[in-house]
Image (tube, rainbow, N blue to C red):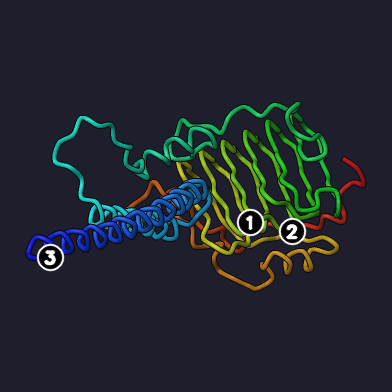
Amino acid sequence: MEALDVVEAFLKDQDQEADRAETRRALMERLKQANEVAAGLQEKVARASLFLPSYDLRLGNETVCKLHEMITTSRHALSPPATFSFKSRRCPPAPLSALLHSIHGDTGSTSRQDHFQGDTRAGDIDAELCFIDREDQVLVKRAGEVGGRDFVLSRLRRCTIYICDTCGALRADRLEGCKVYVGPVRSVLAEKLERCEISVAAQQLRIHSAEACDFYVHTRSGPIIEHSKQLRFGRYNFQYAGCEKHLQGFGLDQDSDMWSRVEDFNWLRTQQSPNWKIIPPLEEENLVSGDLAPSRS
């Protein structure tokens, strides 16, 4: 009888152990799914680092790191790692810094002074959505010709550009002595600009390696500058028929002083950065009307 009790107890323990093992497998599978979700979030934060304000980027990084830590802690609690094993293990999630470096290798980063997004080849871009390799010209896009799509300005010298329409993302690179007037834009990346005057309303604005330029802007977050000098900022001064409706559609119709809250990523002191300043009222350019631009580019 005693032996039978021992066998029954053993079988009961085995059943309970099987139930616990099944539960562990189910929980490990859920943790695996959670880890995949965290990895996806990590990649999204990394890709958004080009335009996210510094506070939002730091908050996103910290949240993703904490999520990875919670998943790892839970996994170890369910299945403690062996102290020694010759078996191959899966690599732990790549550090966020490593993923950022990898993604920036694909999409471009403005974190280094000598970095450039890459050469713009006109053949790779819709001819209707770019102005490339022009000199001493007046270039115009009317309402409906861009229609919220991405637009590129590249290798322009002494040109005046009017984009009387909305853009998704605007990239401007290697502009010299140009005047650029643009309607509402989701995000702007401007790099390697010299002696330019830029007027744009944007949800996000990032400027890299610019010198001696004036920016007349309306933004939802503070403009970000890197590796730039002699920049000046003033209020948005461009208008055209339908501009107010476009601004409203992009959530940029409310008056804001964010245009003056410039963040210099190369200046960490509490004092004002010497690389930018506000345009004195007496030196501000007058309101510019896109309706007076030539009929065609």
Which residue corresponds to mark 3?
Answer: 5
Measured as percent of width and height from the top left, residue 224 is found at 50, 52
Other-residue count near label 1 (Cα within 10 Å), few / some / many at <14 / 14–19 / ≥20: many
Please indicate, yes or no, whether residue 269 appears anywhere in the rendered image.
no
Q: Determine whether the residue tagged by mark 1 lies in a helix, strand or loop.
A: strand
Placement of 251 over or under 168, stated as above or below:
below
Identify the residue shown where x is 48% and y is 38%: 103
Q: Hey, what amino acid is under mark 1?
A: Tyr
| Residue 201 falls in image quadrant | bottom right
Measured as percent of width and height from the top left, residue 94 is found at 36, 41
How far apart in space, not on screen, are marks 3 and 1 (Cα)? 87 Å
* Cβ atoms under marks 2 and 1 closer than 8 Å: yes
What is the count of numbered marks? Answer: 3
Res 238 label: 2
Q: Hey, what amino acid is under mark 2?
A: Phe
Placement of 91 over or under 48, stated as above or below:
above
In the image shown, does 153 or 30 lie closer to the viewer? Answer: 30
Q: Determine whether the residue tagged by mark 3 lies in a helix, strand or loop.
A: helix
In the image shown, does 120 or 235 lie closer to the viewer? Answer: 120
Q: Hey, what amino acid is under mark 3?
A: Asp
The disc, 2 or 1, on the residue closer to the chain's N-terminal end is 1
Res 216 label: 1
Q: Where is the N terminus found, in terms of image quarters? A: bottom left
Please indicate, yes or no, whether residue 9 appears anywhere in the rendered image.
yes
Identify the residue shown where x is 26% and y is 56%: 78
Measured as percent of width and height from the top left, residue 30 is found at 41, 57
Extreme residue in the front direction: 1
The disc, 3 or 2, on the residue closer to the chain's N-terminal end is 3
Placement of 73 over or under 255, stated as above or below:
above
